[in-house]
């Protein structure tokens, strides 16, 4: 997994609550057996018209957000289906961090397992950041070294993240490797329960 | 002294293999259900890591999401065909039992687990699918996982978990006439919101729950995820044991198992982090009008007016939903005309659901504008339904009678809505485009879907005139 230490990039506001994983990656792209190549399908029905042309209205298609890597989203982001394809699509599109007032449970795990940093901030702060991100070229710097978010215009905030998740992200650890070190305990458990 | 525990506490404690100082636990999984869509990358990862499936006998696979539901089951989509073929190959390579499309036991993963008796009280159950919460109806701790976690469970039979919080939802009073388990679920989500139970495992309790059949309990637990919950569960009782006895994979020494299972309930005085009480008397047959499962109105209600909504964010969400759904504020729910009806999905495609729908349909014809289909949840459900003549009732009325699978619940196979089509659906998600790009989904119970198919608009099932069976 790709490690996350510090990241600076263009921030894009997506001011909708309850963005579900069907929106993040529609079902027609779940038939593939590969783990890569999902970035181009991210938010497909919002990014593209039914004739396949880009929808100019949609925020990700606006020129000022080209290359955006930080998403500022609404409450309950990632709800619905457990499809990890949603996390793959976000990561492969180029998103490294997502900021929101809250995230759905399964999505939280999926994002973590793909090196995407999720930052939970109070709703007023998210609204403030979404407002700031309307300015062209607006950038945020997110650091997992000291758990801070700052911009160049004086915004600064601390955030909390579970310690294990922080360690995994900082070191780019994947969980299977950690678990295999506990093999003896798993075997003992199985004997006890047999 | 013994500290009173919730059902969830008991299941949690029994499955912790190891706990870190920060409380993060390595957690043992008893049963792992696998399907074609969320598993190929997991098996691939296993291969790359040089791992085997740790417990193939605790791993069971089926094909459900992609499979065509037409009689010949012909796969015309080469990408879907490759995904199904990949699952077959993986099951062969790793010794995993597969209920393939030709199996007499094939079906939606959350329908076949229980009906084969694989799902049992006290188990931990996972699947790369959010509606794994369904299995909680048996007093199991069951939740959906992503593909990285599927790989993790395949390789280690464990998962790392932080203990979720415990929540109880108490349904006070009896389920009123005309309301079903689906309406319990929709009523609850309307009350607590689609993120109302985030981070929690719900235990459903109360008189209305004890009175529910296993099918009804599965419907309710199934939709726990629509309230944001990690899982939903119901303590096992006589109804549970009666359902499981004699099923193919039920324990050999069944009575001994039942004795153990009886301990699986929350102790008197056990503490929940949160309690929500729902007054059953206020429940009615519900219809969703918007683009998330919390946007619910009773059949006697009206489409809401965005201007009467409190916060600006909610106002925008309602306006956006109404625009997508092409509905005007103030429209009576009963006046909404529909084009399609889908009776199916892991929420409402079990035998009891089909019986309830057939009861409404008997002796009627589907409205000329409406295209209606019934997709049984499994081959077993289909066979039982046919032995009871339900297929003939549906077909005589003009419904399509299909083979089992997920079908138009998510439209990965050819069963989809066309842009602008409006559907009364017994499934669980009314998200934008869920049943097909531009399609408009209204979630309802099976009787409500059946009634709408006949009249062509939403109709209060409490006023339905049932027709007698024709004597032969
Ligand atoms: S029926 Fe629908 S919700 Fe259930 S498993 Fe299939 S796609 Fe998912």
Image (cartoon, coloured by chain):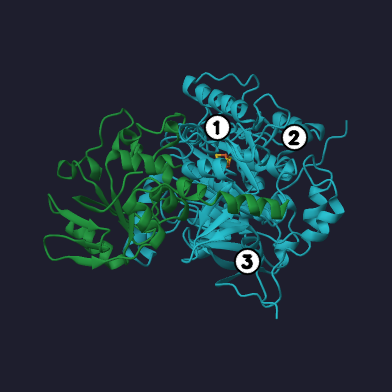
Chain colours: A green, B cyan
Q: Earlier in the sequence, mark 1 or mark 3?
A: 3
- Check residue B9 in the rendering and tell me which mark sits there, or answer none: 3
In the image, A36: left or right of B32?
Answer: left
Q: Earlier in the sequence, mark 2 or mark 1?
A: 1
Q: Tell me the residue at 57%/55% (across/down).
A: B27
Q: Which residue is mark 2?
A: B380
Q: Are marks 2 and 3 on the same chain?
A: yes
Q: Earlier in the sequence, mark 2 or mark 3?
A: 3
Q: Which residue is mark 1?
A: B36
Viewer-side residue, A13 vs A34: A34
Q: Position of residue B399 (x, y in %)?
A: 65, 31
10 Å neighbourhood of mark 3: few (<14), some, or many (≥20)?
some
Q: Position of residue A145 (x, y in %)?
A: 26, 60
- Check residue B116 in the rendering and tell me which mark sits there, or answer none: none
Q: Chain of mark 1?
A: B
Give the alpha-carbon distance from disc 2 to disc 3, as whole Å: 34 Å
């Amino acid at each position: 997994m790709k490690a996350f230490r510090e990241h600076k990039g263009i921030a894009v506001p997506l001011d909708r609550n309850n963005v579900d994983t069907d929106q993040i990656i529609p079902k027609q792209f779940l038939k593939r057996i590969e783990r890569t190549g999902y970035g181009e399908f991210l938010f497909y029905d919002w990014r593209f018209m039914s004739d396949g042309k880009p929808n100019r209205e949609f925020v990700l298609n606006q020129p000022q957000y080209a290359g955006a890597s930080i998403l500022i989203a609404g409450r309950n982001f990632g709800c619905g289906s457990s499809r990890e394809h949603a996390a793959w699509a976000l990561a492969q599109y180029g998103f490294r961090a997502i900021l929101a007032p809250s995230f759905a449970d399964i999505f939280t795990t999926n994002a973590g397992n793909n090196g995407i940093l999720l930052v939970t901030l109070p709703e007023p702060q998210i609204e403030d950041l979404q407002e700031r991100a309307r300015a062209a070229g607006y950038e945020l710097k997110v650091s997992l070294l000291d758990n801070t978010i700052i911009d160049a215009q004086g915004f600064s905030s601390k955030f909390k993240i579970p310690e294990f998740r922080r360690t995994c992200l900082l070191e780019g650890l994947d969980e299977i490797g950690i678990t295999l070190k506990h093999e003896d305990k798993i075997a003992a458990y199985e004997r006890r329960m047999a | 002294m013994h500290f009173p525990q919730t059902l969830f506490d008991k299941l949690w404690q029994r499955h912790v293999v190891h706990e870190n100082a920060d409380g993060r636990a390595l957690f043992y999984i008893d049963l792992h259900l696998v399907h074609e869509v969320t598993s190929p990358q997991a098996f691939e990862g296993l291969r790359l890591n040089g791992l085997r499936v740790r417990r193939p006998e605790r791993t069971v696979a089926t094909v459900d999401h992609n499979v065509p539901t037409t009689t010949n089951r012909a796969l015309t989509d080469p990408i879907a065909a490759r995904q199904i073929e990949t699952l077959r190959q993986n099951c062969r390579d790793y010794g995993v039992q597969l209920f393939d499309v030709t199996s007499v036991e094939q079906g939606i993963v959350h329908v076949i687990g229980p009906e084969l008796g694989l799902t049992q009280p006290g188990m931990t159950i996972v699947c790369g699918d959010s509606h794994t919460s369904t299995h909680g109806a048996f007093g199991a701790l069951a939740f959906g996982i992503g593909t990285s976690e599927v790989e993790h469970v395949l390789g280690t039979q464990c998962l790392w978990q932080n203990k979720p919080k415990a929540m109880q939802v108490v349904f006070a009073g009896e389920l009123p006439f005309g309301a079903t388990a689906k309406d319990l679920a929709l009523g609850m989500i309307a009350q607590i919101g689609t993120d109302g139970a985030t981070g929690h495992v719900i235990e459903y309790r109360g008189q209305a729950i004890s009175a529910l059949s296993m099918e009804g309990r599965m419907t309710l637990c199934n939709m726990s995820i629509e309230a944001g919950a990690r899982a939903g569960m119901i303590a096992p009782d006589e109804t549970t044991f009666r359902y499981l006895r004699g099923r193919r994979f039920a324990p050999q020494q069944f009575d001994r198992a039942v004795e153990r299972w009886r301990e699986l309930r929350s102790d008197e005085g056990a503490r929940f982090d949160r309690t929500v009480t729902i007054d059953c008397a206020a429940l009615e047959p519900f219809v969703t009008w918007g683009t998330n499962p919390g946007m619910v109105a009773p059949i006697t209600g009206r489409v809401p007016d965005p201007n009467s909504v409190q916060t600006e964010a909610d106002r925008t969400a309602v306006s956006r939903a109404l625009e997508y759904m092409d509905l005007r504020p103030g429209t009576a729910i009963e006046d909404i005309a529909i084009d399609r009806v889908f009776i199916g999905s892991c929420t409402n495609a079990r035998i009891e659901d089909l019986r309830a729908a057939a009861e409404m349909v008997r002796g009627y014809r589907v409205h000329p504008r409406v295209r209606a289909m019934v997709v049984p949840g499994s081959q077993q459900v289909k066979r039982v339904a046919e032995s009871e003549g339900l297929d003939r009732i549906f077909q005589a009325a003009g419904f399509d009678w299909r083979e089992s699978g997920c079908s138009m619940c998510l439209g990965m196979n050819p069963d989809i809505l066309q842009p602008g089509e409006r559907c009364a659906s017994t499934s669980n998600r009314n998200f934008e485009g869920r049943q097909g790009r531009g399609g408009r989904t209204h979630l309802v119970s099976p009787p409500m879907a059946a009634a709408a198919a006949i009249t062509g608009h939403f109709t209060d099932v409490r006023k339905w005139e049932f027709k007698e069976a024709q004597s032969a």
